[in-house]
Image: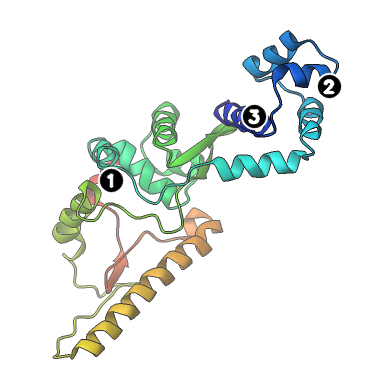
Amino acid sequence: MAQTAELVKTLKAALKSNNLTYAEVARRLDMSEANVKRLFVSKRFTLQRLEDICRLMQMELTDLFQLYQESRQRISQLTLEQEKELVKDEKLLLVAVSVRNHLTFNDIINNYLLSETECIRCLAKLDKLMIIDLLPNNRIKLRIDEDFRWIENGPIEDFFEKKIQKHFLKSGFRGELEHRRFLFGLLGDSSTRLLLNKMQNLTKEFADLHRQDAHLPLDKRHSIGFMMAMRPWELEVFKPLIR
């Protein structure tokens, strides 16, 4: 229903930009103005009626859908208040991290001790925060930009930093899929900048691989923590919620 409302909002904006009033739409479609207003209030359009109205603006339905997509605000960062809201609710944070990792609704409830009701509550909250679109049948569509990032030194980074220092590095890194390297040396400015660029490129490559593997089934993916040290890792705070 949220998507329908936004689509109708896009349609109204398109009519306004084309200087078309409800009265003019009614006249050109041989309808009463009251019926046209009723359509927009109820948001119950048939595809044929949507197509008729689009035709008045010399548009196709695909043009309207494209305008709708362009109107959807995509976010690259949350506000401080939004991050605080995630941190104070462990289940909400778990679901946020899960959808960021491209888990489906069924993946989440099958792998974590969350009821369908609890999961839907969290997804609805993430929809309100504009992190996702919650679609029919509990399908999830991410609304975050490709370069989405948490606030530097914000609540989420602070939360993860404390958990990383306490748990992630508490390992010998000798198991399967585990590796750690610590190097020490004296480098000049240009060499230091070169390494910083390589780290930034590696960060981008990690993000690309993350998106690339999103289509794999959950049992073929590993929850990986990576900071020039890598090992399979789950946040301790989430472990009590794992089935």
- Indicate the quadrant containing the N terminus: top left, top right, bottom left or bottom right: top right
Figure check: 166 above or below 22: below
Where on the picture, by quarter, is residue 122?
top left
> Which amino acid type is shown beneath numbered disc 1?
Phe
Figure check: 41 above or below 160: above
Which is more toward the observer, 234 or 37?
Answer: 37
Sequence order check, earlier mark of 1 and 3: 3
Residue 243 appears in the figure = no
Q: Which one is in front in this view, the residue at disc 2 or the one at disc 1?
A: 2
What kind of element bears circle 3?
A: helix
Q: Position of residue 133 (x, y in %)?
A: 51, 38
Q: Is residue 134 left or right of residue 238?
A: right
Sequence order check, earlier mark of 3 and 2: 3
Which residue: 15% across, 54% down?
A: 162
Where on the picture, by quarter, is residue 84?
top left
Residue identifier under label 1: 238
For the residues bearing labels 1 and 3, Cβ distance under 8 angstroms: no
Q: Position of residue 15 (x, y in %)?
A: 68, 30
CA separation, marks 2 and 1? 59 Å
Q: Residues within 10 Å of mark 1 (few under 14, many from 20)?
A: some
What kind of element bears circle 2?
A: helix
Q: Residues within 10 Å of mark 3 (few under 14, many from 20)?
A: few
Q: Residue 28, labelled with which disc?
A: 2
Q: Residues within 10 Å of mark 2 (few under 14, many from 20)?
A: few
> Which amino acid type is shown beneath numbered disc 2?
Arg
Q: Which one is in front in this view, the residue at disc 1 or the one at disc 3?
A: 3
Where on the picture, by quarter, is residue 39?
top right
What kind of element bears circle 1?
A: helix
Residue identifier under label 3: 16
CA separation, marks 3 and 2? 16 Å
